[in-house]
Amino acid sequence: MWSKFLSDFHIFERLFMDLKFPHLGTLIMVEDYMTNNLKKIAVIGMRHDLGQNRRGVDMGPSAIRFANLNPQLKELGFEIQDHGDINCCTFETGIMGDPKARFLHDIVKHCSELRDHVREVVSENFFPLILGGDHSITMGVIAGVVSHFRDIGLIYMDAHGDFNTPETSPTGNIHGMSLAAITGRGHSLLTNLAGKVPMIEDNRVVLLGVRKLDSEEKRNLRESDITVFTIKDIDERGISEVMKEAITIVSRNSPVKKFHFSLDVDSIEPSVAPGTGTTVSGGLTYREAHLACELIAESKKMISMDVVEVNPILDLANQTGKLAVELILSSLGKRIL
Ligand SMILES: [Mn+2]
C-alpha cells in the first residue's frame, strides 16, 4: 500500500518537473528515496581503462568483487543487485583520435551507457555503487545521478585535481579531466553528458586529499569556487575536522542536501594502496581514509558512490582491492562497535 502510494508520488514528481517546479519535484523525490535509502544497492562494474595509459585498471571491478564485496555488504544488511560489468572498448579496439583528448568518442559512448544505467537504478530506488575503471567513468556516474536528483553535492577524494581540459592537459588523458567536465569545463561532449552544464555547480564541490596539480590546473582551481582541502590542510587540521567541513559544504549548498562520493584510491598513501596507476607519496593514511569514510556514513547524506583507479596488475596480492572493499563498507556504515 505504502509503496503503491510512493510510486504514485513518482508520477507527481515527474509532473512537477515538467511543470517547471523542480524544487517541489525534488523534495518529494528525496522523501521518497529516504524511505528506502541504503537498503538496496545496485553494484555496477565499469571495465574501462581508456582514460589513462597504464593497463590493468579495467580489471578493477573483478579485484574488488574478488575481495568479497557483495557478501560483506549483505552482512551489513543491504539487499544487493549486482548488474555485472558494462563492457567497454580496449586500447586495441578503441580509436585514440585527438591526442589532446585520447579516446574521447569511446569514452563519451561508455559514459553515456553508464549514465543511462545509473539513472535507471536510481529511479528504482537503488543506491548506485560503481566500481571502476579509471576516473573518467565518474563523469558518466554523475551524469546519471544528476539527471534524476538535481543539484547534488560532490566529495571528490583524489591525489590529483582531475581539473585539466584538452587545452591544458600535458598528457591528453581524460581521467585527468573528470572534475573539470563535471563542473562544466572542457570538451563539450564531456561537459554535456548530463544534458545540463555544469552537472554540479562549483560551490557544491569539495576536492580533498590533493597533493599533485599541474600548473594550469592549479590556476584554474584557484579561480574556481570549488573548495580544495589539500593534504597540507589535512595535516594541519586533522581529517576529522576537514571531512566534517567538507560534508557541511557539499550538503549546505545542495538544495536536496545529498552528495555523491567519488573515491580515487590514489588519494591514499601508496604503501597502503600500491595498486593504482598514478601514485603520489604522502597520501592519506589507512586510518585517515577509514575515518573519512566513517564520517560520510554518519552524515547519512551520501546518495551514490564510485571507487576508481584500482589496478590489480600493479597491486600486491589484491591489497588495494581489499582496501577498496573496506572503505566502501566504512562509507556505507560498517562500524567497529
Ligand atoms: Mn582521479
Image (cartoon, rainbow, N blue to C red):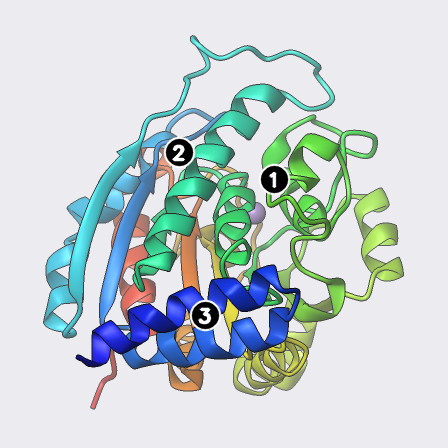
* Label 3 SS: helix
Q: Which numbered mark, 3 or 2, is in the foreground of this view?
A: 3
> What residue is rendered at 69% in x and 26% in y?
172
Alpha carbon distance from label 3 to label 2? 42 Å
Which residue type carries mark 2? Val
Q: Decide: few, some or many residues near mark 2? Use Cα within 10 Å; few <14, some 14-19, many ≥20.
A: many
> What residue is rendered at 56% in x and 80% in y?
247
Which residue type carries mark 3? Phe
The quadrant of the image that shows the C terminus is bottom left
Circle on res. 57: 2
Circle on res. 12: 3
Quarter residue 5 falls in: bottom left
Q: Decide: few, some or many residues near mark 1? Use Cα within 10 Å; few <14, some 14-19, many ≥20.
A: many
Residue 132: image location, x then y, percent: 39, 42
Residue 62: image location, x then y, percent: 23, 38
Decide: is 267 above or below 239: above
Decide: is 18 above or below 300: above
> What residue is rendered at 60% in x and 45% in y?
194
Q: Which residue is mark 1?
A: 193
